[in-house]
Amino acid sequence: MGEIKKIVCRSCGAEWECMTGCGMLHGRLEWVADLYEEDIRKEIRSLLGERQFVPFTFAYQLSYCKSCGNIGSVPVLRLEEDGREYTGSCRQCGQKTELVEAIEKTPCPMCHATVLEMEETGHWD
C-alpha cells in the first residue's frame, strides 16, 4: 500500500501532495512497464520474453525537477538480477528528475529556501 505525503515550505507556504510507494497493480512487471515512455517500455518487455520470472522492486518515489522546479513522485523500477534502474520523467515537463534523498535538504521550487517539511496524510492502493 502506498502513502500520500504532503510537502510544505515553511517559508512561503507552497504545498505539494505526492503519492509514494506502490499498489496492488504494481506486482506484475508488464503492468509496471506501462508507466514508462515507449523506449523504456519496450526494453522492459523484452526481458519478459527472455525469462519466465524477472525479480524486481518498484515504488513511486519523491523527486525534484531542476528544469521546471516541480516536486512530485516518479516511478522507479529496479531489476534485482543486474541492478538496472529505470526512473520516470517529471510529470509536469517531461524532463529527467532527481530523486529526493532528504526533503529538508531540497530547495523549495518557489522561494528556494531549504525549509521543506513532509507529513503522511493518507494511504492509497
Image (cartoon, helix red, strand yellow):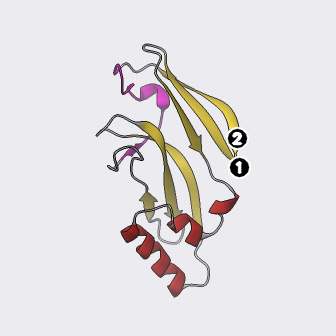
Left or right of residue 64: residue 18: right
Q: Is residue 101 magenta?
A: yes
x then y, percent, for residue 62 = 50, 41
**Magenta stretch in the rendered image:** 97-112
**Whether residue 100 can be seen here:** no
Q: How many marks?
A: 2
Secondary structure mostly seen in the magenta stretch:
loop
Left or right of residue 86: residue 17: right
**Type of amino acid under label 2:** His
Q: Are there few (<14), some (14-19), or many (20+) residues within 10 Å of tag 2?
A: some
Q: Quadrant of residue 114?
A: top left
Is the C-beta separation of discs 2 and 1 under 8 Å?
A: yes
Residue that numbered label 2 is attached to? 123
Task: Name above or below for residue 95 compared with residue 82.
Answer: above
Residue that numbered label 1 is attached to? 1
Left or right of residue 124: residue 117: left
x then y, percent, for residue 99 = 43, 44
Nearer to me, 21 or 105: 21
x then y, percent, for residue 83 = 47, 65
Secondary element type, mark 1: loop
Q: Is residue 118 magenta?
A: no
Chain-order first, disc 2 or disc 1: 1
**Type of amino acid under label 1:** Met
